[in-house]
Amino acid sequence: MRNSLVILGILEDQDIEWFTRIGQKSVLSTGDILIEEGNPIESLWFVLEGSLSVTTIKDTSIKLATTYPGEIVGEVSFLDSRPPSVTLIAAERTTLLEITRKELQIKLQNDFSFASRFYRAIGVCVAQRLIHLTQTTLTISTLGVVDKDTEQEEDTGTVLDPDVLEAMSLASRRFEYLVERATKN
């Protein structure tokens, strides 16, 4: 499941409007590096169009994962100020909406309701990622191999909080709004 759908399902319309007002659209060409392993980052990005390959700086030919439209990157580094442990490279022309750490911190400090929703949303995303990783690790340790068909599907075996599931339709509409507003600028 795209992590921004979880986030956008938990946030409110006024939060999405704030992202579109504050965010800056940027476009990466194929091969451009967005995040480099070991280098601190100062932003959070919504992937609006295109995709990013998740690799390590030691060997960018090995793809660990791919991020697609609807995903947010940089959220873990926002929570934990240590430099990222992966590199993200544009796999194709990729459009992003960037929210700077400074702007986001100001919003979080001044709007406690937003802060509560934002941190809950990030927490749910990190929990989903951990559950998926745990299930994958258990499958590998039990079977000794990764089921390639299962690996390509997104969290099909993961059970989400019913409140989050209810918000998915709304989240999809919010993402469409975010893309529409961000790409017009």
Image (spheres, rainbow, N blue to C red):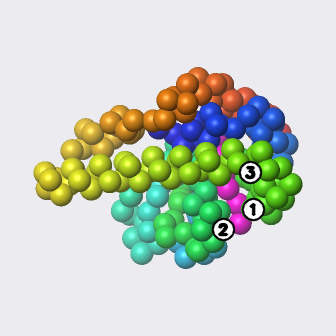
**Residue type highlighted by circle 2:** Ile
Is residue 39 visible from the viewing direction of this image? yes
Q: Is residue 69 magenta?
A: no
Closest to the camera, between mark 3 and mark 2, is: 3
Tell me the residue that label 3 is attached to.
115
Q: In screen coordinates, is 2 left or right of 12?
A: left
Q: Give the percent coordinates (x, y) of residue 54.
A: 46, 58
The segment highlighted magenta reads: 41-51
Q: Nearer the viewer, residue 138 or 30?
A: 138
* Label 1 – label 2 distance at C-alpha: 8 Å
Q: Is residue 44 magenta?
A: yes
Q: Could you tell me what secondary structure mostly forms the magenta stretch?
A: strand
In this figure, what is the number of numbered marks? 3
Closest to the camera, between mark 1 and mark 2, is: 1
- Residue occupying image coordinates x 53% and y 47%: 125
Q: Give the percent coordinates (x, y) of residue 118.
A: 68, 48
Decide: few, some or many residues near mark 2? Use Cα within 10 Å; few <14, some 14-19, many ≥20.
some
Tell me the residue that label 1 is attached to.
101
Mark identifier at residue 18: none
* Label 3 – label 2 distance at C-alpha: 20 Å
Q: In screen coordinates, is 2 left or right of 62?
A: right
Q: Give the percent coordinates (x, y) of residue 68.
A: 52, 42
Q: Nearer the viewer, residue 88 or 147?
A: 147
Of pointers 1 and 2, the one earlier in the residue sequence: 2
**Residue type highlighted by circle 1:** Arg
Q: Are marks 1 and 2 in contact (CB under 8 Å)?
A: yes
Tell me the residue that label 2 is attached to.
41
Decide: few, some or many residues near mark 1? Use Cα within 10 Å; few <14, some 14-19, many ≥20.
some
**Residue type highlighted by circle 3:** Ala
* Label 1 – label 3 distance at C-alpha: 14 Å
- Residue occupying image coordinates x 51% and y 39%: 2
Of pointers 3 and 2, the one earlier in the residue sequence: 2
